[in-house]
Image (cartoon, rainbow, N blue to C red):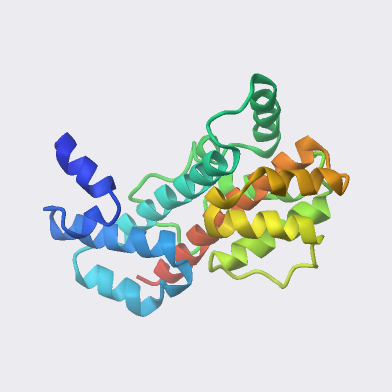
Amino acid sequence: MGAELVDLILSPDGWRTAPVEPRLAATLMYLDRLTREPESVTEAFIDEVIAAGATPSGLESASLVCLVFSVINRLVDAFGADLSPVEAQTLGAVLDKGGSAVARLRGRPKPWVRYGGTIPAPLTTCLQEVRQGKGDAPPPIRAAIEARVARQAGTIRPEPPALPEEVTDLVDTIAADAHGVTDAHIDRLKAAGWSEPAVYEFVFVASFAAGLGRLERAIRLLAAR
């Protein structure tokens, strides 16, 4: 695939006109919907995508790609590219404790092995660390953030306990459009008594949940196909 074609596919809505084979075009249509409007990914839509040339196993693999970039893009958007060395070190420590979504995908099943409606074991481990692992933010708060954002991403979770208003404001912004995170969000959290590492954990948990929720919805719907 040439560089110009890749640039076209990666441009906003460029995939719609890119001269690619039907299977790839259908997969790109699926990824666009899963990324932008996860709750609109239904059994009927998946059947439409498969009829257009995509394969169930290919869609599962594409869903993992969606997870990875849903997490990474939100982290980059929320923190920006201008972290100071101290801030970068703090964020690195948070990621070490919480587990990188990319690193946790090591050891996942081979692409031709179907998931059968369950998320890969490394991600299950990461989810438990996100909810209950050691950190500056209390585990009940982290678990509530994960459930809230994952539900917004289209997966099934019990209704979580209410979060403090300043935390809700941050994580809902990350879930919808992390570009919207501003210094005001962070200042408000710090004014409420949350430490900087705790705030970074909020961002990581919300970003992880946005990706995982999309993956869970996708593989649940793909399980019977």
Front residue of 219/114: it is 219
Q: Position of residue 92 (x, y in %)?
A: 65, 28
36 relative position to 127: left or right:
left
Outermost residue to the right:
193
Residue 210, by quadrant, is: bottom right
Q: Residue furthest front?
A: 184
Q: Is residue 129 visible?
A: no
Tell me which residue sits at (33%, 50%) in the image. 112
**Apparent side of residue 62 relative to residue 103 in the rendered image (left or right):** left
Tell me where residue 25 appears, x and y as whole percent: 20, 59
**Camera-side residue: 152 or 60?**
152
In the image, is 110 to the left or to the right of 52? right
- Residue sitting at 77 percent across and 56 percent down? 166
Indicate the quadrant where residue 186 lies.
top right
The structure residue drawn at horizontal position 42% and vertical position 68%, both measured from the top left corner, is: 223
Residue shown at 35% from the left, 58% from the top: 31
When the figure is inspected, residue 58 is found, relative to residue 38, above or below; the finding is above
Give residue 17's quadrant in the image: bottom left
Position in image of residue 9 (x %, y %): 23, 48
The total of numbered circles placed on residues is 0
| Camera-side residue of 8 and 110 | 8
* Quarter of the figure that contains the C terminus: bottom left
Image quadrant holding the N terminus, namely top left
Q: Residue furthest toward the bottom?
A: 44
Residue that extends furthest to the top in the rendered view of this protein:
85
Residue 13: tell me if it is visible.
yes
Residue 215 in the image, given as x and y percentages of width and height:
49, 58
